[in-house]
Amino acid sequence: MRTVPPPSPAKYEKLTLRQVIKEAAQPNSRFVLWLSGHSQGGAVMQVWAYHKLHEDGVLPHHLLGYGFASPTAFEGR
């Protein structure tokens, strides 16, 4: 079996999470933020996702959250 060496580190763009979130607010973003959480982590994920959507302007199609066995963090209006 032939192994392929990993690409040179110079080929990768170094980004912070803040830069990725800022780009996720643009329609042509390269990123989809995947979130997950179990139990209390699922509730925290819901609050964090809400904040990113409503406060930071992340577009819904650039954010995917999956919480399992978690309490509901918000009540419907």
Image (cartoon, rainbow, N blue to C red):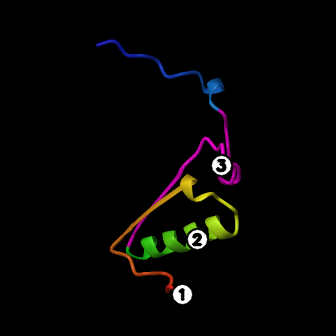
Q: Please identify, in this view, whether the residue under mark 3 or under mark 1 is nearer the observer.
A: 1
Q: Position of residue 68 (x, y in %)?
A: 35, 69
Question: For residue 55, what is the image quadrant?
Answer: bottom right
Query: Which structural element holds mark 1?
Result: loop
Residue extent of the magenta highlight? 13-38
Query: Marks 3 and 1, Cα distance to the nearest angstrom?
Result: 31 Å
- Residue for badge 3: 20
Question: For residue 3, what is the image quadrant?
Answer: top left
- Residue displayed at 49% across by 22% down: 6
- Residue for badge 2: 50
Left-right relation of 26 to 63: right
Q: Amino acid at mark 2?
A: Tyr
Q: Is residue 3 magenta?
A: no
- Residue for badge 1: 77
Q: Position of residue 31 (x, y in %)?
A: 58, 45
Above or below — where is 21 with respect to 54? above
Q: Amino acid at mark 3?
A: Val
Above or below — where is 28 with respect to 33? above
Which of the two residues, 69 or 24, is positioned nearer the viewer here? Answer: 24
